[in-house]
């Protein structure tokens, strides 16, 4: 079984998250950069299966700048057997359409029976890449799974719905995405961190993948305007001098809150 897990370096959710006002792109230097937690959970699904099924190959795949290699290598320290990173200047600002096409080519290069992703990243929160990836790969998809069972020929799981839960399945090869209902990921131990330094880590470009992306249209959808959020103003303080209720009612009416 060959399992590919998509991982992504994102700004730490506990740090500052800003846009570069000149470009409208995320300012990734504004805070620490970490491996997205939902990607770690997806990797945990693959590693748990590999623990119980010797011979399983787990590869992490990512599309990021060259300096994200150290973050992606955490996936190797956790237990993945190999990593493949797509690095190319033409991909700066790439939107979901371009990202899905490139990642599909990277997944094909790695070889797969099953692709596991998070349902949405914490920076872009697009939530559609797993389905787009399955379309590019021409394989079935089972998305937003809260539980996963991987078999020899199919993958099954449960998905929350407005009316309860639904049981879904897909024949392999397939693409699945998981939610935060899945268990937390394991922590890399010292042995895993040392072993990660010797594991295969392939860095490829668009040319290596045979994908042609025009740098001028890497983003097929663009942001037309961006501005910094204004500073939060001081609130209104109401002191009860016997007329607090009237003042509160007037405030609510004035601000169209009542």
Image (spheres, helix red, strand yellow):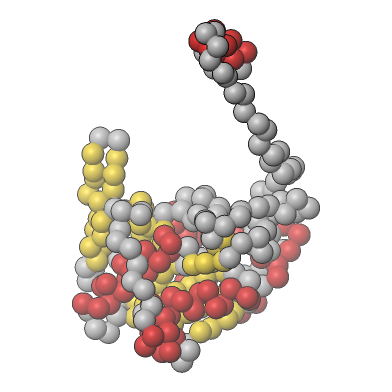
Position of residue 9 measured from the top left corner of the image (x, y, whole percent): 54, 66
Q: Residue furthest front?
A: 241
Question: In the image shown, does 145 or 112 lie closer to the viewer?
Answer: 145
Q: Residue furthest bottom?
A: 198
For the N terminus, the image quarter is: bottom left
Query: In the shown orientation, is residue 177 left or right of residue 250?
Result: left
Tell me: residue 228, above or below residue 198: above
Number of numbered callouts drawn: 0
Query: In the shown orientation, is residue 16 left or right of residue 14?
Result: right
Task: Give the residue drawn at x 26%, y 73%.
Answer: 49
Task: Give the residue drawn at x 68%, y 52%.
Answer: 19
Tell me: residue 251, above or below residue 14: above
Position of residue 246 measured from the top left corner of the image (x, y, whole percent): 54, 7
Tell me: residue 237, above or below residue 81: above
Task: Give the residue drawn at x 67%, y 33%.
Answer: 233
Position of residue 174 measured from the top left corner of the image (x, y, whole percent): 35, 63
Position of residue 108 measured from the top left corner of the image (x, y, whole percent): 47, 73
* Whether residue 112 is visible: no
Location of residue 204 (image quadrant) = bottom right
Query: In the shown orientation, is residue 153 left or right of residue 217?
Result: left
Tell me: residue 104, above or below residue 78: above
Task: Give the residue drawn at x 55%, y 54%.
Answer: 123
Location of residue 186 (image quadrant) = bottom left
Question: In the image shown, does 224 or 231 lie closer to the viewer?
Answer: 231
Question: In the image shown, does 69 or 200 lie closer to the viewer?
Answer: 69
* Whether residue 204 is visible: yes
């Amino acid at each position: 079984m060959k399992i590919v897990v998509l991982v992504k370096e994102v700004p730490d959710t506990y740090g500052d998250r800003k846009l570069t006002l000149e470009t409208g792109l995320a300012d990734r230097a504004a805070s620490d950069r970490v491996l997205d937690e939902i990607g770690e959970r997806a990797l945990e699904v693959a590693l748990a299966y590999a623990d119980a099924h010797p011979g399983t190959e787990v590869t992490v795949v990512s599309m990021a700048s060259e300096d994200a290699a150290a973050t992606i290598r955490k996936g190797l320290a956790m237990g993945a057997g190999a990593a493949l990173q797509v690095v190319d200047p033409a991909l700066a600002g790439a939107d979901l359409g371009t990202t899905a096409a490139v990642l599909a080519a990277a997944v094909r290069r790695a070889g797969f029976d099953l692709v596991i992703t998070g349902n949405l990243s914490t920076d872009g929160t697009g939530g559609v890449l797993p389905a787009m990836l399955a379309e590019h790969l021409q394989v079935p998809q089972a998305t937003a799974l809260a539980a996963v069972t991987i078999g020899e020929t199919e993958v099954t799981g449960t998905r929350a719905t407005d009316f309860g839960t639904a049981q879904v399945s897909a024949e392999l090869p397939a693409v699945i995405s998981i939610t935060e209902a899945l268990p937390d990921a394991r922590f890399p131990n010292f042995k895993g961190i040392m072993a990660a330094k010797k594991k295969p880590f392939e860095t490829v470009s668009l040319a290596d993948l045979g994908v042609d992306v025009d740098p001028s249209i890497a983003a097929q959808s663009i942001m037309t305007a961006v501005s910094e959020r204004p500073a939060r103003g001081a609130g209104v303080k109401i002191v009860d001098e016997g007329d607090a209720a009237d003042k509160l009612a007037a405030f609510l009416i004035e601000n169209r809150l009542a």
